[in-house]
């Protein structure tokens, strides 16, 4: 009996401590601004890695081309919808997985913007690319209205390489 009470009290204390520390984390941005994905990554960026939008890049046997960048102002409260149209071509000799989550956008402060959940016709949707196959589609991101210094990162899940594009 004493042992079960001790276990229950210990578990209760651990849960209270866990909830308190979770509540102390800061999500989003300062008060009064729209919340964004609360993620920052320890990215080390050499400016020589940044590619212009017009350049096609090969990463791990697949080629990525950015076909267009469109910004829709005020898509929702204080945020713009950034639409990046990409074409990925498998130039390797094996099937390559393709996942929207391999792409993310980050801003000058290091805030990471994962792809937004939106209902659009032309989203990038191919789950895999066979050798020689291409897929073209939109990658949607919500960003703070008027925010600049945006960089698109593509890190294919099947390898350790990446490509970085300066969008503005």
Image (tube, grey):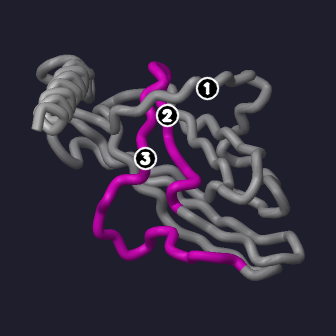
Q: Position of residue 129 (x, y in %)?
A: 69, 77
Please tell me which residue is depicted at 30% across the width and 32% down the height of the picture: 144
Who is closer to the viewer here, 146 or 16? 16
Q: Is 20 located above or below residue 162 in the figure?
A: above
Marks 2 and 1, the one that precedes in the sequence = 1
Quadrant housing residue 121: bottom left
N-terminal label among 3 and 1? 1
Q: Nearer the viewer, mark 2 or mark 1?
A: 1
The reply to whether discs 2 and 3 touch (Cβ–Cβ < 8 Å) is no
* Image location of residue 96, percent across then percent down: 73, 71
Residue 105 shown in magenta:
yes
For label 2, the residue is: 106
3D distance between C-alphas at marks 2 and 3: 9 Å
Extreme residue in the right direction: 93
Residue topped by disc 3? 114
Label annotation for residue 43: 1
Q: Magenta span: helix, strand or loop, mainly?
A: loop
- SS assignment at label 3: loop
Tag 3 or tag 2, which sits nearer the N-term?
Answer: 2
Q: Is residue 114 magenta?
A: yes
Q: Quadrant for residue 18, please give it.
A: top left
Q: Which residues are magenta?
A: 100-129
Does residue 34 appear in this view? no
Q: Is 145 above or below relative to 83? A: above
Q: Nearer the viewer, residue 17 or 77?
A: 17
Compared across the picture, whether 76 is left or right of 152 comes to: left
């Amino acid at each position: 009996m004493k042992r079960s009470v001790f276990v229950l009290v210990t578990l209760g204390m651990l849960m209270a401590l866990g909830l308190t520390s979770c509540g102390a984390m800061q999500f989003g941005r300062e008060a009064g601004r729209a919340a964004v994905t609360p993620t920052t990554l320890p990215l080390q960026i050499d400016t020589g890695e940044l590619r212009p939008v017009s350049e096609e890049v090969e990463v791990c046997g697949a080629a990525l081309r950015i076909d267009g960048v469109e910004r829709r102002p005020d898509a929702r409260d204080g945020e713009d919808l950034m639409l990046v149209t990409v074409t990925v071509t498998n130039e390797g000799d094996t099937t390559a997985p393709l996942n929207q989550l391999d792409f993310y956008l980050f801003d000058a402060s290091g805030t990471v913007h994962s792809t937004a959940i939106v209902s659009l016709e032309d989203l990038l949707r191919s789950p895999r690319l066979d050798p020689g196959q291409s897929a073209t589609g939109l990658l949607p991101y919500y960003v703070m209205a008027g925010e600049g210094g945006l960089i698109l990162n593509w890190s294919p899940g099947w390898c350790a390489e990446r490509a970085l594009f300066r969008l503005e």
